Amino acid sequence: MPFAESLWGNLVQDLPLLVPVLFLWIVGTLMLWPLGSWLLKSMPKRQWSGITFVVLLVTLVLVFRTPAGQGFSGMFQVDGLTTGFQILAIVAAAITVILSQPQLNALKEQSVEYYALILFSTSGMMLLVGATDLVSLYMALELMALCIYILVGYLREQDRGIEAGIKYFLLGAFSSGLLVYGMSLIFAAAGGKTTNLAALNQALALAPRNAELMIFTGVILVLAGFGFKVAAVPFHMWSPDVYDGAPTPITAFLSTAPKAAALGAFVRLFGTAFNGVHGDWAAPLSFMAAASMILGNIAALRQQSMKRLLAYSSIAHVGYMLLAVLSHDAQAGAQAIWLYMLTYLLMQGGVFAVIIYLQGKGEGERIEDFRGLSKRRPMLAFAMLVFMLSLGGIPPMLGFFAKFYLFKLAIEQGFVTLTVLAFLTSAISAYYYLNVVATMYFKEAPEGEAQPMGSGLSIVVFATCLLVLVGTCLGPWLMDWTARIVLV
Amino acid sequence: MHMTTWLIPLLPLFGAAIIGLLGRKLGRIAVSVIGVGVVLLAFAFTLRAFVLAGSAPDHRLASCSFTWMSTGNLSVPMGLVFDPLSSLMALVVTGIGALIHLYSVGYMWEEEGFARYFAYLNLFIFFMLCLVLGNSLPLLFVGWEGVGLCSYLLIGYYFETDYAPAAGLKAFLTNRVGDLGVLIGMMALFAHFGTLTIAELLTKVGHLSPEVGFGILSFATLMLFVGACGKSAQVPLYIWLPDAMAGPTPVSALIHAATMVTAGIFMVCRLAPLFQLAPITLSVIAWVGGITALFAATIGLVQRDIKKVLAYSTVSQLGYMVMALGAGGFAAGFFHVFTHAWFKALLFLGAGSVIMAMHHEQDLFRMGGLRAKLPITFWTMLLATLAIMGFPGFSGFFSKDEILYLAYLRHPALWVIGVAAACCTSFYMWRLMALTFWGEPRDPHAYEHAHESPWTMTLPLVILAVGSVVVGYLGVPEAFGGHFAIGRFLEPSLSFGQLHAHEGHHEGPAILLACISTVLGLGFGLFGFLSYRSGTALAESRAARFPTLHRILLNKYYVDEGIERGILAPVRGLGRLLWQVGDVIIVDGIGVNLPAALARLGGEFLALFQTGRVRNYTLGMVLGALAILWIFFK
Amino acid sequence: MVPMNQVLLVSFLLFSIGVAGVLIRRNALIILMCVELMLNAANLNLIAFARHSGTVAGQAFALLVMGLAAAEVAIGLALVVALYRKKDTVQVDGINLLKG
């Protein structure tokens, strides 16, 4: 059986690239069966969050130890971009796991499956950022998304929970329909010979002139599919509703990890496969970026719910990051996005930790609930102040540093109009961020005792606050790390 | 040497810092020791620098200076300079300052904010020394602003009352008007000469001849003089000084009589070679000084508050000094600063002693007969009164006579004004003495409990009294056979090595003029004493005979009311207009609220599309994709 | 041999029917079926062009899409069942608690 032998040989040779992903798969599967349902059945369910956290830490170590290289017939590649965005996905998942523990406890909804799904979804993201083929790209995207559909609808006994789940699923399925059709058009236009991204780039360059409409439509549909995943206007409409209805830790997850992974893949896909047809997607993407900045920031102004506010502000932040995707220099763009996403991840983690503390049993995340937080819990209010200032991009917070780096790149790449727009809309965003601060510091607190805060939440708030606060001082170190985000 | 000179201003700063930070924990005794000690030490170091500067070849000792700021062609050094003028002034500041600090220990002992008071007072000494010793105009200005700040803080020391904070604010705001003048003057000088270092500036000025007409020098010096008007309480910016009496009495003695208020005169002396080149400014100065001297003295005639009388007296005496400057007698003006510092500080401290003995009673008409109860206070104040009225042989006699003589040389009308002011001064001072110490006690209860002050208060009184008598002999005018020694001593500073700066020639009827003014002064003093010796009845009947005049004087010529109606009310109206039209409608409305409302409206509009229905969302996605296809496909 | 243009046309029609169905129908199950139509339109393209060029990559892709579609339907049906249990309906127009 020479075929099977060569297959085995290739597999053994390429397997090291996938060690972290395989590790997640194995642990996730074991958690579902037999560990979760049989062997460790008597163990309290809430301990799974700790175990999952440790698993993610081990995965992080494995990611650092994974050698660079390409494998699986050119379907998967480990390079600086892969490693960098894999780290982001894992950190986001780890924060989510810590945040999940107190809230699921309060709701009495702990289960092994929840944590296993987070692991599987994370593995999908890790594949997504390394995918160098339409097939693996689509497969990874679906692996990531399918798990998140379930997580969003996890609280199926709540009206809002199931509504969010079904909405996200239907819209997500629709968007992946658009994505696959777009991929098939591009595949067809390239002559139907290859699905490899690099090869596609060459084939598209040789495509006949009458295929132009097909290529353009395909690119736009792919853009729509990815735009949906990162919630860019006009494919954003799911995000406020889903953020609102999903369990709060999953909202935190949703606003960071899939976005990081999808943006990583975005850069790779458009930077390699569609590099030759830059003219086709640059203008539509800049339109999406501008629309996202404007709509996200303006719609956030009227929000009363903190989660919806963050959903809209997240749309705006994606708008800023799309500026970097536009960059002609894909590598510099990827670096700026990585830095921005890392910062964003920390800020969101901290903010959601505060929200979860205030929510208690998963109810009430209105901005009003922040009234008088400075009296009730001064440290927490201060941390929230830091996060809000950082999200608003006010110096000397880390958020300013990342935003500055991003905007600087955009100016250098000649997107002056868009950058000015980004500055202006960023000024609008200061209004609603500072409104939260004003509510915390200048409004009377409602009656009632301050509740104790879990150690997990405290650690997340403390650590992220510290990083956001002093992060700028670590500038050189951060830049050093950013420089490793290399597209090979 | 360098170290010890730097310690002179820094010691009080350390004192202020320590007392200010640790005040409450230190306790009163430690605060007193530190507060008085640092100023005494500073005095000792100043004395040493004074002697060393005197023995230096050019009578000048510049302490090491480093560059404070350097931008473009502006380079400001930071350093101290000891020349006859600045070192003598520094001696007054630290010497009389130390005495008043000592006096304050007794006077303020019962006060709640004892430490706060000493922190401010030490800080004041620091800024005052910066002003006096600074070698550049910016450093002088730092001190200038700093003493204004301390003055504001100390006037408002009794912050729980209504009037003290208001008085502090009035002083501060009025001084801001003057400060603006100083700033403009400094900029004009920099624009013209390209330097702000005093020595360089005066060197450059040296080979210029007096300006004809109104030029840059006249403009710059006039602006600087506006600042001097603010700080030294000249018409029309004197209004803050009488109100400043709301502060504790030792503060009135130190800041509002002996040192800070003379800063304006000091600055003019500092830049004397420059002012000498601007004849227009000099005549403005002379007339402003003369008018102030007479104007304030007439108001002082009818005041009932003992401190108010002394305050108007201070304004009047400052007017004398300024008039001397305008007459070209910089040395004479400064000599009067020097003598006035002694006797006016003494008068204030004596008044403080009386006020304390009378349990914070300041109304002259409720005092009387205190001679026996407060012997030390009485005798020292008597000496000070003789000094201020110009009794022959006392310090005020020599300095005032020199000024009057120079005024006569400038313009005989100025001499008439000066003599009239001197007569008023004699009158109200003897009125004050008679009402306080002679006659029957008009408040028997308070009289019963009155007693002499503790040694911390009487010791400074005695030392100052000795000074009030003898310091005049430092400058016996040539008319009386002296050599005007102080003039010669100050010569290097005032002329800065130039030849054309010298005092007026002593000729004409010097002795005659002195006799006329002295006799008139003594006569009015006697008149005042006799009028009030046996009580207030005689004076009241006289006031009833001239009701209008009396009312005008009592209400200080309605100057405050005039300023309120003529300046403050229109300014407030303008402010309200700008606020309601400029700020509320234009800036807040069109500039801020309109865009905010638009953005909010945009948010509401966008919310219409966020219906919550899956079908609308899919439609949105498809339409969005189609729109992109349609718009961007070439 | 069927010309490629006609394959594209058929797949486009299939895709359009799917999109129209998603836009028009209110029943969650039917929306799910319409999404399947969209995926199959893509599959048609993939297989036809793979066959046309004589390579297998497109066919493998189509197989994978079919597999993932099945997984998607499984999850979708589970969510629809949960929706039905909670709200007694599978009409998606009725669910709009979350809006604005």
Image (cartoon, coloured by chain):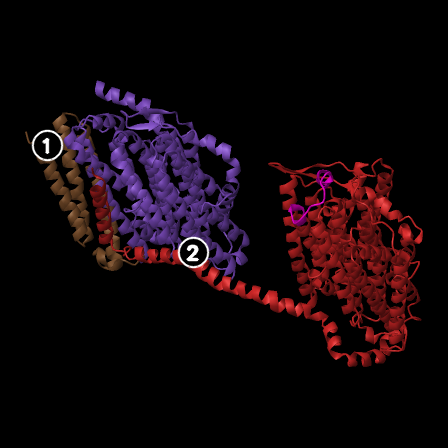
Magenta-drawn stretch contains A64: no
Q: Position of residue A388 (x, y in %)?
A: 46, 49
The quarter of the picture where the C terminus of chain B appears is top left
Q: Is residue A202 above or below residue A107?
A: above
Residue sitting at x 23%, y 28%:
A200
Chain C colour as displayed: brown
Question: Disc 1 marks which residue?
Answer: C4
The range drawn in magenta is B198-218
Q: Nearer the viewer, residue C11 or B433?
A: B433
Q: Which mark is residue B591?
A: 2
Q: State the purple chain.
A: A
Which quarter of the rendered picture does the N terminus of chain B lie within? top right
Q: Is residue A126 left or right of residue B101?
A: left
Residue A260's label in the rendered image is none
Q: Colour of chain B?
A: red
**Mark 2 to mark 1: distance in Å?**
61 Å
Q: Amino acid at mark 2?
A: Gly
Instruction: Choose between A374 and B414: the one closer to the eye.
Output: B414
Q: Position of residue C16 (x, y in %)?
A: 14, 44
CB under 8 Å between discs 2 and 1: no
Q: Chain of mark 1?
A: C
Classify mark 2: residues with Cα within 10 Å, few (<14), some (14-19) or many (20+).
few
Q: State which quadrant residue B555 falls in.
A: bottom right
Of the residues tagged 2 and 1, which is closer to the observer? 2
Looking at the picture, which amino acid does disc 1 mark? Met
